[in-house]
Amino acid sequence: MLEAGNVRTQGQRLAKLYRQVGLDVQARQANVALTAGLAQGEQSLRRLSRYTQQPAAARTYGRCHSVWQEFRAVVGEPYSAATAERAGQLAEELAIHAGKLALQIEAGAESPAGRALDGAARLNMFAQRLARLYFQSLAGDRSQGLLTDLAQTRSEFASGLLELERMPLNGLQAREALVLVRNQWIFLDEAVRVATMWQRGGRDAQHVATSSERIQETLSGLAAQYREALLADSRAQ
């Protein structure tokens, strides 16, 4: 589940970083993160390949792998509005297929630790999707569809964060991580809220770039904590 969640998150994150490079928002850092994120996604897919022995999971994995290969090629091209739009579309496909794969391969998903792990992975994906949509707006897309997606993703993140904060298994380390996430969410949410009213860049764009990366780092660490709890539960059974 952790690896499938990483693929789901990296698709949205890398499409976001690709937009950042094109818009020259922390472009140098975004390029470095883009390269590293591609390597992380490749590693997660290699680890997931062992589930190809399960027929249902094999079909979903095959689709994930196929979409990822096209996605990788797209974000490797020089930036253009068309390639950025295609990267966003492929990120959405990856989110769907990787989410389905997580459910197919993780028998412990209904345990408290399994639900927490899935919740952290989904929350991370929502944060990256929100930032990607923000930069899509900054690039000139002011369509009603985009504004609706922004509002829906903001709502999904807010409710998901609240649900994760209420998880009974959260220890001190997890609670501290969630405080950091909420603090960064304040910056991200405000910048995105402003974007739904009028187009702005400057400091708002910097806040989105920085806060979304900090959220990603913190939630990735939190997901790893939940995975350890899930493994401990499995060993105890």
Image: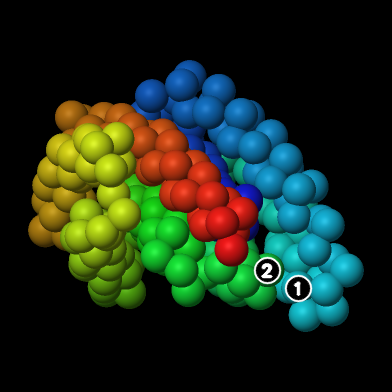
Query: Can residue 181 be seen by looking at this rendering?
Result: no
Q: Position of residue 119 (x, y in %)?
A: 39, 61
Q: Is residue 101 left or right of residue 222?
A: right
Q: How many marks?
A: 2
Position above or below: 140 against 102: above
Q: Which mark is residue 128?
A: none
Say what amino acid the circle numbered 2 marks. Answer: Ile
Position above or below: 26 against 92: above
Position above or below: 210 against 152: above
In front of the other: 143 or 185: 185
- Residue at the outermost bottom position: 56
Say what amino acid the circle numbered 1 marks. Answer: Ala
Quadrant position of residue 41? top right
Q: Is residue 7 left or right of residue 144?
A: right
Q: Position of residue 183 (x, y in %)?
A: 16, 38
Numbered disc in front, either 1 or 2: 2
- Residue at the outermost top position: 28
User: Crowdedness of circle 1 by 10 Å Cα count: few (<14), some, many (20+)?
Assistant: many
Quadrant position of residue 237? bottom right
In front of the other: 106 or 99: 106
Q: Is residue 39 left or right of residue 108?
A: right
Q: Residue at x 17, y 49 (%)?
A: 189
Q: Which residue is mark 1?
A: 57
Dot 2 lies on which element? helix
Circles 1 and 2: CB atoms closer than 8 Å:
yes
Q: Which mark is residue 105?
A: 2
User: Crowdedness of circle 2 by 10 Å Cα count: few (<14), some, many (20+)?
Assistant: some
Q: Residue at x 39, y 54 (%)?
A: 120
Q: Residue at x 22, y 54 (%)?
A: 165
Query: Can residue 80 be seen by looking at this rendering?
Result: yes
